Amino acid sequence: MHLIAPSILSADFARLGEEVVRVIAAGADWIHFDVMDNHFVPNLTIGPMVAAALKPYCARPQGAHAALDVHLMVQPVDALIDGFVAAGADVISFHPEASLHVDRTLRLIKAAGCRAGLAFNPATPLQVLEYVLDQVDLVLIMSVNPGFGGQSFIDSTLRKVERARKLIDAAGRDIRLEVDGGIKIQNIQRVAAAGADTFVAGSAIFGCADYKAVIDAMRYELRRPSPASKVA
Ligand code: DX5
Ligand code: ZN
């Protein structure tokens, strides 16, 4: 199943709760929560206190709540995990370069009852997955360099998405393949064709007054039969 995960990085930070409610009403599946530390990435955003404050707004009038999808762009990682677990994170992803002991960090997240994700920068290879794929619930392929919303999609990352899809299928476990950065109505179908099933979109959704129109258009693109496309 395809999931759309709006990144609140491009939402109105003065009205975050309201923005989360609006984007869930517009059809968001997950809420993507970008954590930046001005060290691993050159920007500074929000932490566990804001996640805890927003968690109640992830509830849906009926049915399951929208998952809080925490993307850690911080270094070091481990000390922040408890705070995000307590805040109600459903998924916590981190970048392997940011943890000295990737296996330990994955185990910390899993032991706390959260789903664990590994995030890969555009130039970071997938090798680290070889020995930890049995602990990973999500592979996050960055299609921009992390740090800012509104950047252009880097096409060469589609090859990595294809590769990650093969590794996940071979693992035979329920692992989501998320792509983050520069996703728009115009390119979401190509990203899906490469094997992604979970799509982060910040500026494409929050940059438009009608969130539902954008999410509906993305879902339409995802349902539309794709032309047999060859990835460059
Ligand atoms: C970038 C963040 C992304 C970002 C995506 O470091 O991880 O989640 O918000 O924003 P857009 O969709 O505008 O590229
Ligand atoms: Zn992100």
Image (spheres, helix red, strand yellow):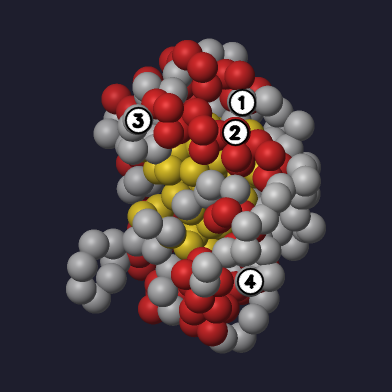
Is residue 8 at all visible to an observer of this figure?
A: no
Amino acid type indicated by mark 3: Gly
Count residues near mark 3 (Cα–Cα under 10 Å), then give few for <14, some for 14-19, many for 20+.
Answer: few
In which quadrant will I find the N terminus?
A: bottom left
Q: Where's residue 103, x and y in %?
A: 46, 16
Q: CA distance from mark 2 to mark 3?
A: 15 Å
Residue 214 placement: quadrant? bottom right
In front: 41, or 80? 41
Q: Which one is nearer the viewer's eye here, 44 or 201? A: 201
Q: Earlier in the sequence, mark 1 or mark 2?
A: 1
Sequence order check, earlier mark of 4 and 3:
3
Q: Amino acid at mark 4?
A: Ile
Q: Which residue, given by chain and number where applicable, does mark 1 sit on? A: 126
- Residue 20, compared with residue 129, is above or below; it is below
Mark 3 within 8 Å of ligand 2, using the beta carbon: no
Distance in Å between CA atoms under marks 1 and 4: 27 Å
State the SS at label 4: loop
User: In the rendered image, which residue does mark 3 sit on?
Assistant: 172
Residues at marks 1 and 2 touching, judged by CB atoms closer than 8 Å: yes
Q: Is residue 167 above or below residue 158?
A: above
Q: Identify which residue is drawn at 61% across, 41% down.
A: 161
**Neighbour class for label 4 at 10 Å: few (<14), some, many (≥20)?**
some
Q: Earlier in the sequence, mark 2 or mark 3?
A: 2
Horizontal and vertical percent position of residue 173: 33, 32
- Front tag of 1 and 3: 3
Q: Amino acid at mark 2?
A: Arg
Q: CA distance from mark 1 to mark 3?
A: 17 Å
| Above or below: residue 51 compared with residue 60 | above
- The residue that mark 2 highlights is 163
Q: Which mark is residue 189?
A: none
Q: Which residue is mark 4?
A: 185
